């Protein structure tokens, strides 16, 4: 366990300090976890979430076709027409991303909205960094709003027996959806302050003309089928990834036949960010390694010992410990581990564990926003910026993400306690 913890700590320090080499750091660390027999070799491939990787690759390919259709440029024109300056444009994009992310995976949301932000930045000759970061952290925030918004929500729904409507009204009280939305309003006000100096006026010329709507229908079909698939019980683990890859292949085959050239196929393959895919694959293995070594279980046991029998203290520690842990480790195995812990605490104290379930989700889902490597959506957004020639320092990212995250977490923390303990 000590070896795993040391290796894990060194890995994340290097990930933060060497942004250009994150994929190789993660891959090297993953290899060490296997070579040191921390993670059994037979679990090497199974620990990788192939569904996420397929979803990212497929959506990236579809987004490439979407960009070539000039639809992002038209959407950028429409937003620019309505917004008075850059600050309001960034806020509009973050809110738009948040709404979509309440129903679609956060990574897919970033991949769909980021091209619009990049197109706007090119039209205005400004950096897209702040816009992309805002989109990423806003999509992570909204993931806890509905049953289908994030894997952690799906985990909670399955464990607590919650259905889609329970996220809106639960036990006769307002559910996580409204708690998250109020948090989103507060955190958006924080972004309004953070970007207070982004007052460049924006001017829109002639609207872009879109001549091919098929790539837009491809993305829309992907979104609708992802939502539909979320309601199917006992579906294969790679369902979402298969959907994204299938729609991408439909789009690229159609483009091939339309143009009569194989170059469009080659171009979309090149647009897939293999650096980000390698980084995520490595991180999946690293997280599986520390879980196998018992590090996550030890943290959970320590958490229980520290909390004692004071419910408010238990709740407070659960929320903010979840924020801290999820800033550095994948929140999926963490939530999967802590849900039984929360249920056990509820049984020992003879209380309804709902307050602990919701507190866990508020902390774990939003905690990933604290650092650039705390959530897949953040890693993906930085990969997009890297392809555009922008290397984002961790300090720049956290200058925006920390006040945003803490505003949302504190709001959710107080609201959940007041609603379910009143």
Image (tube, rainbow, N blue to C red):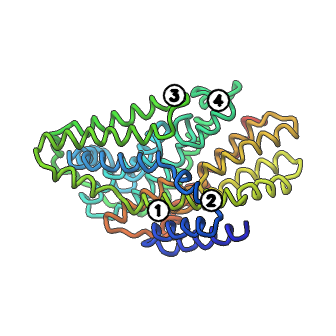
Q: State which tag comes first along the sequence, 1 or 3.
A: 3
Q: Is residue 322 above or below residue 150?
A: below
Q: Earlier in the sequence, mark 2 or mark 1?
A: 2
Most foreground residue, 416 or 157: 157
Dot placed on the residue nearer the N-terminal end, 1 or 4: 4
Rounded to the nearest whole Å, what is the CA distance between mark 2 and mark 4? 35 Å
Which residue, given by chain and number where applicable, does mark 3 sit on?
A: 231
Q: Rounded to the nearest whole Å, what is the CA distance between mark 3 and mark 4?
A: 12 Å
Q: Are marks 3 and 4 in contact (CB under 8 Å)?
A: no
Residue 153: % across, % down: 59, 39
SS assignment at label 1: helix
Mark 1, residue position: 279
Distance from label 3 to label 2 (Cα)?
A: 34 Å
- Proximity of marks 1 and 3: CB atoms separated by less than 8 Å: no
Q: Is residue 251 left or right of residue 35?
A: left
> Badge 4 is on which residue?
162
* Residue lying at 42% horizontally and 63% vertically, measured from the top left: 197
Residue that label 2 marks? 40
Please say whether residue 198 is visible from this viewpoint.
no
- Real-space Cα separation, disc 1 to disc 4, in angstroms: 33 Å
Position in image of residue 388 (x %, y %): 31, 64
């Amino acid at each position: 366990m000590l070896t795993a913890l040391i290796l894990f700590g060194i890995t994340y320090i290097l990930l933060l300090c060497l942004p250009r080499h994150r994929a190789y750091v993660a891959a090297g660390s993953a290899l060490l976890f296997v070579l040191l027999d921390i993670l059994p070799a037979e679990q090497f491939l199974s620990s990788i979430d192939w569904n996420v990787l397929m979803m990212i690759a497929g959506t990236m390919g579809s987004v490439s076709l979407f960009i070539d259709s000039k639809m992002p440029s038209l959407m950028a024109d429409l937003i620019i027409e309505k917004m008075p300056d850059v600050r309001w444009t960034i806020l509009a994009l973050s809110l738009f991303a948040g709404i979509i992310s309440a129903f679609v995976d956060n990574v897919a949301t970033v991949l769909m909205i980021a091209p619009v932000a990049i197109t706007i930045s090119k039209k205005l000759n400004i950096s897209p960094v702040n816009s992309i970061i805002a989109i990423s952290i806003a999509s992570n925030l909204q993931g806890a709003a509905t049953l289908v918004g994030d894997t952690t929500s799906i985990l909670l729904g399955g464990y607590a027996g919650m259905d889609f409507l329970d996220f809106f009204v639960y036990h006769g009280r307002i559910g996580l959806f409204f708690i998250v939305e109020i948090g989103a309003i507060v955190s958006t006000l924080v972004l309004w302050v953070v970007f207070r100096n982004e007052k460049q006026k924006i001017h829109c010329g002639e609207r872009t003309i879109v001549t091919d709507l098929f790539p837009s229908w491809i993305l829309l079909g992907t979104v609708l089928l992802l939502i539909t698939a979320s309601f199917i019980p006992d579906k294969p683990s790679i369902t979402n990834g298969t959907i994204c890859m299938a729609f991408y292949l439909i789009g690229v085959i159609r483009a091939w036949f339309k143009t009569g050239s194989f170059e469009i196929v080659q171009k979309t393959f090149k647009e897939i960010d293999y650096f980000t895919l390698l980084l995520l694959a490595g991180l999946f293995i690293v997280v599986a390694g520390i879980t196998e070594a018992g590090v996550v279980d030890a943290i959970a046991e320590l958490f229980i010992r520290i909390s004692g029998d004071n419910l408010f203290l238990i709740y407070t520690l659960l929320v903010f410990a979840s924020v801290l842990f999820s800033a550095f480790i994948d929140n999926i195995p963490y939530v999967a581990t802590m849900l039984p812990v929360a249920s056990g605490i509820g049984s020992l104290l003879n209380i309804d564990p709902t307050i602990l379930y919701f507190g866990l989700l508020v902390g774990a889902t939003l905690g990933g926003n604290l650092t650039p490597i705390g959530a897949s959506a953040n890693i993906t957004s930085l990969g997009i910026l890297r392809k555009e020639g922008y290397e984002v320092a961790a300090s720049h990212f956290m200058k925006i993400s920390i006040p945003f995250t803490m505003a949302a977490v504190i709001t959710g923390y107080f609201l959940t306690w007041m609603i379910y303990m009143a």
